[in-house]
Image: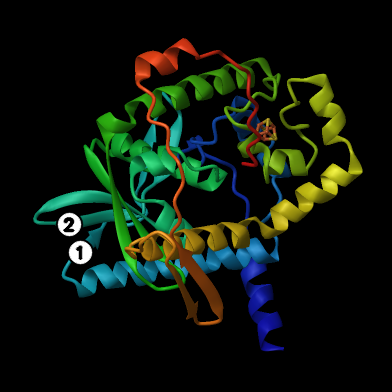
Amino acid sequence: MIAERVAERIVTGQKIHMPAGFRASEAGHLCARYHYHARVDWGARPTPDTTLAHIFRLGQAIEEYVVRLLQDAGIQVVKAQVAAYERASDIVGHVDGFAVVDGEEIPIEIKSVSDWTWRELNSFEDILGSQKPYVLRWGAQLPLYLYLHGHERGLWLLLNKQTGQLTEIEVKLEQAWPLLERVDAVLRVARDAITRGVPPDPQPDSVAFCAGCWCRQVGLCPGAAPSDASASKIASDPEIAEAAATVAELRDAARRYESAQKRLKEALAQLQLTAGQRVDLLLGTVPVRVSAYETTRYDVPDDIRRQYATRVVQQRVEVL
Ligand code: SF4
């Protein structure tokens, strides 16, 4: 009864507005076709479903909470959600605010993330190397605010939704410049396509952008086609589709598992054992065994190793 009324309120509060330009928050979605549809077909954009609407609402509440945390620590946040627009690039954005630290106003972007993502992201390079489309979009978002507001550095404040801890990642405008140049090139293609009235080919910078893209969801875009005919055949196999659905369902849990397992292994690798020694221990309900054994290592000098070197083709499959 209560939950239903709350859900109804949250879902009906979601509205799609006509964009006043290319949104800085989405500019890092490196696909010209996406930006074409986001401007031309914005009316076809679906409102967030119930789950997403709740996630957005929680994100808003966490943003307010983080601002209060800063204020409790004596750091004022000014010019919250102030708008900026640049006519030449036609980019519009609303920064979360400016934290006033020792008299300096620093643009901030507040993000709430899972424990796994919180541990994974420690630098601007980590953000750029992420396979998550929403994290990739952050990479351009804050630097664009720096550019639009004429500031040299900014901070992402990441709140761990599991532990409540806060961490910060600094980015300098000069550091992000190569990315902003790529963004500029993508938006230029989108602008030309809007003028011509013809959508660009579906050629995103990474197929990761197609996952969850609303343009594909509503049938405006088929998504990036596989660049190889035999790959297309594999992609249309129902058993492969079922395996992919399982990966999508369990991916986050598997990544959390891998991250936790890595931490356990790193901690236990600090034990100094002698060859043949074995230690068994129980960590909660998880049995662990650490053992030391001898193997033979061949220390071959580089000049001799090089004599036996040959080039071979290897294949790597990455599930992004
Ligand atoms: S589905 Fe892929 S190619 Fe199509 S608009 Fe979205 S990101 Fe671009």
Residue at left offset 42%, top offset 32% = 298
Q: Is residue 298 left or right of residue 236?
A: left
Residue at left offset 29%, top offset 39% = 146
Q: For residue 40, what is the image quadrant?
A: top right
Q: Secondary structure at mark 2?
A: strand
Residue type pointed to by label 2: Val
Percent across and percent down for residue 268 are: 39, 65
Percent across and percent down for residue 260 are: 49, 64
Residue at left offset 33%, top offset 45% = 123
* Residue 314 to residue 310: above or below: below
Task: State the count of labels.
Answer: 2
Q: Secondary structure at mark 1?
A: strand
**Could you say which is closer to the camera, residue 89 or residue 246?**
246
**Residue that extends furthest to the left in the rendered view of this protein:** 102
Q: Which residue is mark 2?
A: 100
From mark 1 to mark 2, how far is it between C-alphas?
5 Å
